[in-house]
Structures are given as structure tokens and as C-alpha cells.
Image (tube, rainbow, N blue to C red):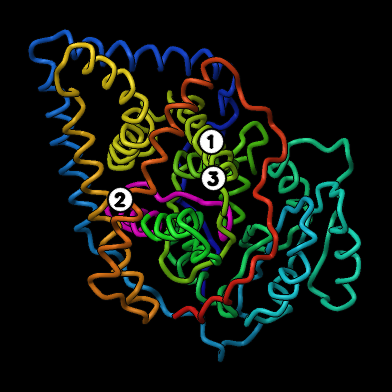
Amino acid sequence: MLKVSEEGVWPSDPDWLQDYPKSEGRRRKAALLLVAVWASVFALHQSSRGFWVPIGLTMMMGIHLLRLLGTRPASIPDPISRDSPPESYPFISLVVAAKDEEAVITSLVEKLCTLDYPASRYELWVVDDNSGDRTPLLLAELPQRYPNFHWLRRGAEAKGGKSGALNQVLPLLKGDFIGVFDADAQVADNLLRAVLPYFEPVEVGAVQVRKAIANAEVNFWTKGQSIEMMFDSFLHERRNAFGGIGELRGNGQFVRRTALERCGGWNEDTITDDLDLTFRLHLDGWNIASVISPFVQEEGVTRTLGLWHQRNRWAEGGYQRYLDYWPLILNNRMGFRKTLDLVIFWLIQYILPTAVIPDTLLAAWYAQPPVLLPLSLLTTSLSFVGMFAALNRIGKVQNKPLNLAQITFGSILGTVYMSHWLVVVASVTARMSIRAKRFNWVKTVHVGAAAHAPTQSP
């Protein structure tokens, strides 16, 4: 049965977090970095040998990405046996921070309170963050039906958004492990029994299950999000196996309580609590397991404007953490492999999209090819290859293998869809240099979209 001890995992200086995150001066740091990127691209265009820098980066990054794609992931562990006595099961606390979720909150509570796990060994807490719809009325009816369900209502004066809601309920939680879900989550009955074995290595501080899109067949955007989530989970599974960075994705994340408390809970000075906690855990010496199975379904964004707002928030939150924790990253606190992996994906996800604009403008001005063309071709081609491998693997894991035509078409669709990230990041990095985003509840509207329940996880 799973052990809960964590002795000897973390570095010797547990008070490192006292001075972090350094969230002040984000606008200034973002502006300096933006100027540095544009100046670097200009210098490359001015130098007769400037093209060697992108070629060198392309070779370094290409080797790293190819090794990731070729890394064999760890095998999927067996779920906890149903024959185990109930008292041997670890106690788990499930938490949902909800605001104006009347369309989905009842079905969520009903599902999470009837999982295939001893009811005496887990609890569900819903934190209603001063909802203005019928959410509190619906929640008030549920404790009579489910003894392991509890809820807490925050007042209008409460601050901190989702992070504040999670921090407020944390002292009330009894679990050794804490699972966090969004209000539209749909899970398999055996989710908890399937997740806990991933915590067997004592250095694992958190587990992120694969996210899947429940309404994937609605339109181009939801299909793209579905492929994106498969690729994201596949990629982080490989990064884990290679000794790189595993990341949290909010919905369907499980955190070892000791690790969470050592990291100071959730950061209320960020717009993406999950991405910030990812860095805190790795900086404190923990690993994060990103797993293909089990998985959690959620509603995909169906409209262009909604997707634009959601991805802007994700991009800014992801970028914030580099601005906040960069001294610790440069000091190699995470270790060489994690730091190298982190820097390479920072270049791919944030620096390259930001640099594409000045590179394109200067290439047009000087009537010459973009100097960053090798890097752009590398990321596009490996994105396609990664999506191809992800669709193939996940199809087999779900016992629903896809044929060659389906995998190829899905990889092309996903690659085209992901091009929106270039526009999002370029916009966000420029805006962060001028105006920071307000810290308030920003959420995807959930409508209880019709979707099939997830199949039983292996």
C-alpha cells in the first residue's frame, strides 16, 4: 500500500520560499526582456554570421526534442486493488473552487461523491466564491445526500480568486493527498484507485492526469483543443521520463499535502495557480508525474473570442513565473536536466513566438529570409511528429487505436490549430510590458455541454 512519508526529499534550506515569488516589477522585467529579444533579432540581421546562432540553437534544441520523443515512458501502474481493506486506503481530499456554476455543479458533486473508493477514506469540498447564480442553493441541498460532501461559501470581500478559495479551505482538509478539479470535470469511477500508485516514488510531489475534451466534435476549435491536450500530456510524460519538467494543468491535479504546505499553498499573486505551483514544487525538490491514464474530461471552448481570452490568461500566467523565479532557475536549483529542459521549452513557447515578429519585419525590409527560419521549421515539424506519436499512443492506451489516415489528419489539424499560440504569445508579451492583468476570477463559462462519460481507465 502507498507510503505517505516524505523524509529526505527536499533540499536542505526549507525557508527558500520566504522571498519568493518576486512578483513586483513584472511590467519592467517584461519590457526589458521584450527589448532584449527585439535587439537580439536586429543584431542577428546586422551580422554577416548571424545565421549561425539560430542554426546552433536549432541543432541543440532538435537533439533535445528528438531524445524526448524517443524516450520510453514508465509503464502505467495497476490501480489499488478493490480487495484491499478500506482502512489501508490513504485519505484523499477533493476540492473544487466554483463561481457561478449552476449548470454543472450538481452533476459534479454526484459523480465525485460516488467514486469507486471507500467513502470513509475521502471527502469532497466545494468552495463557492460568492456566486451570483443558483450555485449556493444547489450546494445546500447536497450534504444530506452525501455524508462525505462539504461546502464553504466565501463573502464578497474575499480576495485571491481561485487561489484564495483553495487556500481558505486548505486548513479544513483532512487528506494526505489533495485533488483539485474544475466544476465541469467528468471522471471515471476508478480515478482515485488509478492515480494513487503514481505517488509510490517518495519524490513525487504531485500527479497531473491527462485532460481530455468532452465536446471535441463540436467544431474546429474543440477538435484542436482535444489534440492539443493529447500532445501536451504525451510530451510531459516524455519530459518526466527524461528527467525534465512535468507540469500541473489545474483540472485533475493531485498534490501531496506535505509538498503543498512546504511550498506555501497556492500563490494568490498569479493568474494561473497551477503553473506557479509547478515551479514551486520543482524548486523545492519534488517531481510532478504527468500521466496518460487515468484522465479527466472537461468542456472545450467553442468560440474564437472565448479561446482567445483563455489562452491569453494561460500565456500570461506561464510567462509570469519565469519573471518571478528566474534567479532560482539560473542558480540551477532544479538540477541540470530540469533546468536545461525548462530553458529549451521557454525558448520554444515564449521567446521564439515573440521574436518572429521583428524577424519577419526585418526580413521583409532587407529582402532576405528570416534568420529564425530554421528554428521555426524545427518546432513546426516536431510538433507534427509529436502529435502523430501522441494520437497513436493514446489511441492504444484507450483500446481505440486510430488508423494511419486518422492520425495523419489529426496531426495536420493540430499543427494548424496550434499556430494561434504565436499570435497569443506575441500579443501577451507586448501587453505585459505596458499593462499587467488584473487579479480576479477569470474562468471559462461551463454550460453542461452534452458529452459522453469517460471510459473506465485501465
Q: Which mark is residue 312?
A: 1
Tag nearer the camera, 3 or 2: 3
Question: Contact, CB < 8 Å: mark 2 with mark 1?
Answer: no
Q: Residue 243 carries which label?
A: 2
Q: Is 214 left, or right, of 351 in this rendering?
A: right
Quadrant for residue 369, please give it: top left
Mark 3 or mark 2: which comes first in sequence? 2
Q: Residue 400 carries which label?
A: none
- What amino acid does circle 1 point to? Asn
Task: From the top left corner, tell me how far across and down residue 9 is, in percent.
Answer: 45, 50
**Front-lying residue, 269 or 197:** 269
Tag nearer the camera, 3 or 1: 3
Instruction: Please name the residue that numbered disc 3 is placed on.
Output: 304
- Dot 2: what SS? loop
- Dot 3: what SS? helix
- What is the spatial separation of the Cα atoms under label 3 and label 2, in whole angstroms? 36 Å
Q: Is residue 140 magenta?
A: no
Does residue 137 sit above or below 380 in this rendering? below
Mark 3 or mark 1: which comes first in sequence? 3
Quadrant for residue 82, please give it: bottom right
Does residue 80 sit above or below 421 in this rendering? below
Mark 2 or mark 1: which comes first in sequence? 2
- What is the spatial separation of the Cα atoms under label 3 and label 1, in whole angstroms? 12 Å
**Front-lying residue, 8 or 444:** 444
Task: From the top left corner, tell me how far across and down residue 24 is, in percent.
Answer: 59, 18
Q: Is 274 left, or right, of 419 in this rendering?
A: right
- What amino acid does circle 2 point to? Gly
Q: In percent of the image, x 43 and y 51: which residue is there?
A: 287
> Magenta region: which residues?
232-254
Q: Is 69 left, or right, of 34 in this rendering?
A: left
- What is the spatial separation of the Cα atoms under label 2 and label 1, in whole angstroms? 29 Å
Q: In percent of the image, x 57 and y 76: which residue is there?
A: 452
